[in-house]
């Protein structure tokens, strides 16, 4: 008698990348005179300062392998920036470089599960950047969204490998009580990972870091992609709890993760100079207010967010894809339906004001001449 073979387990199939689903909207928007204006992804369009670009080509650091944890100059510059801009003192030895913060967002659950194999749950905001949930999936963990800290079930807290917070928040622009998040993590013995890459773009109050609450049990992630228009350079850092930073940096070292030496040299220049960031803040604030005003003329309720360069706009009838199609058809704008950021985001669209002023003005004029419903 032949034993029946068990069916092979189903392997992981990557879902469609969310932004690849916008191709039809791009075709619609491209049909307008002047073409489409892509406001779907937070890709900076403005040039970084010349000194930063010159550092990329003039450091001589391309000749050798860069330190995975970051050069001393890089770690000292990042540490000094935290003190200067946000009053948070973190020793350079508790700072480490990463290949853009998305690399760490996606990879941290894998590395932390090696450290704590008895835990299998990643907690993340219910409306948020999709890589928090995907990072949990890639690590074979449970991805559990939460609306607020007090809604987290005790069993989920007991199984939590880490909890993500994101302030300022992508896509909503909201600001989180980081002190409460740090306290929750310490109370439950759960590392708090705080994604703060929009910290320089707050409009009603100064930017805040969880590191100002002390470093015990917390790690903050920071990026030069938004701050200094260096998204293509892929450079950021993580800082905070010395044991957590050391563990993550040692695991990543074995895996060969390292920011190229010339990029680290450019990052040092970027972190030491704030005037270009202040100028960029004014650009984004102006663009947010201009496009929000055009949307109101178009008949869409829209307020400037408290932070980030995104407008988080409710679809009047709850149909985000229909609103996205209207904005493509009448404004030539390609925007992201809110479901990309979790089921609770459905009914909204996210609009990134990351195109040059003349392109945003083109969208604004198109909307202002279209009849409101």
Image: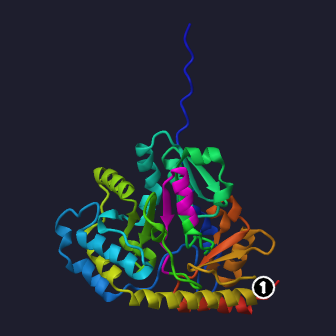
Is 230 placed left or right of 294 in the picture?
A: left
- Residue 62, horizontal then vertical, whole percent: 20, 69
Q: Is residue 17 visible?
A: no
- Residue 252, horizontal then vertical, whole percent: 33, 54
Disc 1 target residue = 299
User: Residue at the location (57% across, 45% down)?
Assistant: 158
User: Residue at the location (23% across, 79% down)?
Assistant: 57
- Whether residue 189 appears in magenta in the rendering, the answer is yes
Of 5 and 305, which appears nearest the observer? 305
- Whether residue 35 appears in magenta in the rendering, the answer is no
Of 90 and 145, which appears nearest the observer? 90
Q: Is residue 11 visible?
A: yes
User: Residue at the location (57% across, 27% down)?
Assistant: 7
Of 304 and 183, which appears nearest the observer? 183
Q: Which residues are magenta?
A: 180-200
Tell me the SS state at disc 1. loop
């Amino acid at each position: 008698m032949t034993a029946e073979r068990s069916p092979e387990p189903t392997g992981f199939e990557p879902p469609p990348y969310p932004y690849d689903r916008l191709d039809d909207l791009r075709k619609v928007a491209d049909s307008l005179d002047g073409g489409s204006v892509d406001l779907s992804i937070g890709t900076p369009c403005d040039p970084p300062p010349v000194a930063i670009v010159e550092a990329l080509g003039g450091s001589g650091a391309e000749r050798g392998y860069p330190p995975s944890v970051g050069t001393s100059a890089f770690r000292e510059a990042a540490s000094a920036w935290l003190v200067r801009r946000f009053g948070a003192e973190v020793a350079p030895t508790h700072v480490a470089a990463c290949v853009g913060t998305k690399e760490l967002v996606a990879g941290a659950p894998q590395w932390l599960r090696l450290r704590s194999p008895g835990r299998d749950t990643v907690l993340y905001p219910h409306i948020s950047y999709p890589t928090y949930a995907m990072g949990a999936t890639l690590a074979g963990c449970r991805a559990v969204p939460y609306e607020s800290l007090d809604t987290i079930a005790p069993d989920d807290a007991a199984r939590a490998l880490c909890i993500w917070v994101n302030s300022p928040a992508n896509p909503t622009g909201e600001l989180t009580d980081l002190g409460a998040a740090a306290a929750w993590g310490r109370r439950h013995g759960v590392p708090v990972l705080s994604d703060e890459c929009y910290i320089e773009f707050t409009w009603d109050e100064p930017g805040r870091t969880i590191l100002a609450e002390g470093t015990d049990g917390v790690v903050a992630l920071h990026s030069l992609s938004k701050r200094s228009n260096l998204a293509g350079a892929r450079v950021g850092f993580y800082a905070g709890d010395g044991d957590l930073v050391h563990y993550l940096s040692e695991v990543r070292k074995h895996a060969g993760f390292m920011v190229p030496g010339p990029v680290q040299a450019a990052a040092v220049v970027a972190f030491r100079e704030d005037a270009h960031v202040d100028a960029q803040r004014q650009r984004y604030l102006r663009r947010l207010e201009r496009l929000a005003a055009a949307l109101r003329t178009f008949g869409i309720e829209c307020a400037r967010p408290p932070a980030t360069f995104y407008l988080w706009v409710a679809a009047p009838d709850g149909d985000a894809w229909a609103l996205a199609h209207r904005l493509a058809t009448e404004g030539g704008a390609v925007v992201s339906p809110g479901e990309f950021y979790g089921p609770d985001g459905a009914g909204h669209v996210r609009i990134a004001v990351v195109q040059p002023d003349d392109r945003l003005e083109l969208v604004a004029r198109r909307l202002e001449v279209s009849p409101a419903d």
